[in-house]
Structure formats: C-alpha cells, structure tokens
Image (cartoon, rainbow, N blue to C red):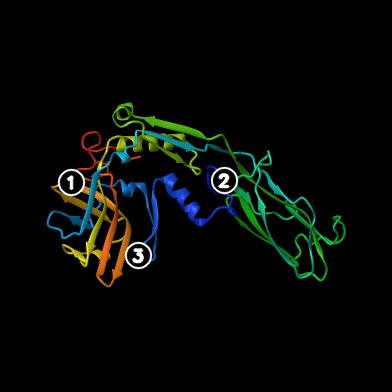
Amino acid sequence: SHYGRAWNPERTTLLEALRDVCQVTAGRFFIARDGTATYRTRGSLQNPAVAAALTINSLSALDGLAIALDVNGVVNECDVTVYPVETVSAEQVIWKARTVLRLAPGQTRVFYANFRDSDGERCGAVDVVSPVPVTDYTVNERSDGSGPVYTTDPAFSIHTETEATRMKITLSNTATGALYVTLLQIRGKPLRVYDPITVQKVDSTSQSTYEKRSRSFDLPMQPDPVFGQSLANYWVGRYKNPILQADQVLAHNRDRIGSVNLFSLGLLDKVVINDPETGASGLGHWIISLDYTLDPAGFAVRLGLERADDRQYWLLGRAGYSELGRTTRIGF
C-alpha cells in the first residue's frame, strides 16, 4: 500500500509509478549498463565523499567540453504540492459485490475489486483482510441463498491478491452443478485523501537580481507538508544563484581519458572537472546520459552531465564531515 493520491493500477504504467516514487523521494532510478535495476537515494546524491570515476583537467584530450554559468538554471521561487492523508482507524467494508455471482461447473472467474471509502470515492487501503468464510463470503447451491451450503466445501475455492487500491479475486467451482456466491465483501482501513497543500519558498534578493524564476513539484505520493517545505527550501537554497556547470563531454576516436576507459563509465558515476580557462575547479558532476556513435570516420563517446551538489553535508562519524554547523550542513 502507499500514502498520498491513489494510484489506479489500470491507468498507471510502471514508468509513471517509478517516476512518482523517485520524485517524491528526490532519488534516481535507472537500468545500469549490466542490466541491473538501480536506485540511488537523495542521501547518496548529496554525499560529497563519493569518489570520482573520471577527473578531467587541462591535460585531458577532449574534443568538446561545454561549461557555462547559466542564469536559466536559477530557481528563486519553488512551489511543492503534497497530498495529506489519514488512515481511517476503524475497519470497514471497502468493497462489496452488488449482485449474486454465479459459477458454472468447472468455471474459474477472475476480477478486480476496487476499494472505496464511505463516500464511494476510489481510495487506497491498509490492513486489508483476506475474505473470511461466512463473515465475508457465503456460497450456496441456489441464488436465493437456500439449498446446500458450499462456503467451506472444497468444491469451492477463493484466492486473493491485494494491491494498493484493489484486490484481485479468483473464484473456482469444481462441483458438478452451478454455485452461487451470495455474499462477497472486503474489509480494511481506507486512506482518506484531503485537499492538496502547496508550500512555497521564495528568495526576494535573487528575484530582484535575476527576475522571478520558478520551479514547481507535484508530489502525488507525498503526504507530508514538512517534506514539501524542505524540498522547496533545498531547491531555492541551491539554485538561487547561477552555478558553473558542464553540460557534456565529447571524446572522438579515444577510448580513454587518462587511465580511465570511457566505455567503463556508467550512469550516475561522478565526473570532476578542473578547467583553468573557465575557472572550474573541482566541479563535481553526475553522468546522466551515455551516447556512443560509430561511423566510417571513427567513433565518439558523449557524456551528458548534471552538476552534483558539492556542498558539504553532514556524515555521521566521518572525520571532516561531522562538524555540524561549522564545515557541514544537514541534508534534507
């Protein structure tokens, strides 16, 4: 189960769900070069102690290095929208069959039961109970509930798989005659979703210098306004002024820079750039794309880069990183 605005699985793709999760945790998900599904937390992305996989300096043989101090990257107003929820403490019926369900001899029926709150609105739920015989379902030989009872008879079986906002139900009949499910319901604790809350962080000094430049986040899976405020504070604190950054590195007909094989680099490896001509010194970047080109003229390797957060964050028990308030700050 999850908290926040409910996912409807029949309309949500896996990619959209992963994007929501990564955005709400400020992390990154990607498929590594060996095919491994990989997730990096915001803690690892804010870790200044991560070693560089590649260091570029004035002696590095390159065919392209784009470094700029770009005002377009400034963020001096950040809005974050979160979706508060409340778990209803009392267990209640969150789905109930509207009609008697008929099972022909030898038939198996599969369907999904969508959870709803007391207002009839689609919702997520926690502590969902697997249907209990007699209490949550009854099975009879006749549709009016009369005749022999098959509720606990081995000729009838029920199998369930619970998801965040629905339950997959499989009913099977191995009896020689038709069976009727005269009661079928699901109990659990629904998640009540309230109106979204938008929090904001503004830096007026930056706005007077660079004009208003805003960034908005819509976090459907985040219920906590405190997290939203922390995220807004982080973005404005980091981007209220232009930062020097490289967009890409290009090497043509070279498979190495220094001792590093360019084909060994992977996504979110760290690249540190020292370039006296632009004033870049120790600029950390994450690799966010890898582009290999092969043609009759040779081959090329292009690294797409994103500036890493080089501010000094507090690391528990690490010398040089644990002097909170003097040389380090707390991440969010």
The image quarter containing residue 57 is bottom left
Q: Secondary structure at mark 3?
A: loop
- Among numbered discs 2 and 1, the one appearing first in the sequence: 2
Residue 267 in view, yes or no:
no
Residue underneath mark 1 = 280
CA distance for labels 3 and 1: 29 Å
Q: Amino acid at mark 2?
A: Ala
Residue at the image position 36 percent from the left and 62 percent from the top: 32
224 or 231, nearer to the observer = 231
Residue at the image position 27 percent from the left and 38 percent from the top: 242
CA distance for labels 2 and 1: 45 Å
CA distance for labels 2 and 3: 33 Å
**Residues tagged 2 and 3 counted as in contact (Cβ below 8 A):** no
- Among numbered discs 3 and 1, the one appearing first in the sequence: 3
Measured as percent of width and height from the top left, residue 163 is found at 58, 53
Residue 209 in view, yes or no:
yes
Measured as percent of width and height from the top left, residue 220 is found at 51, 43
Residue at the image position 73 percent from the left and 56 percent from the top: 133
The reply, left or right, for residue 170 in relation to residue 281 is: right
225 or 277, nearer to the observer = 277
Q: Secondary structure at mark 1?
A: strand
Residue underneath mark 3 = 33
Q: Amino acid at mark 3?
A: Arg
Q: Which mark is residue 6?
A: 2
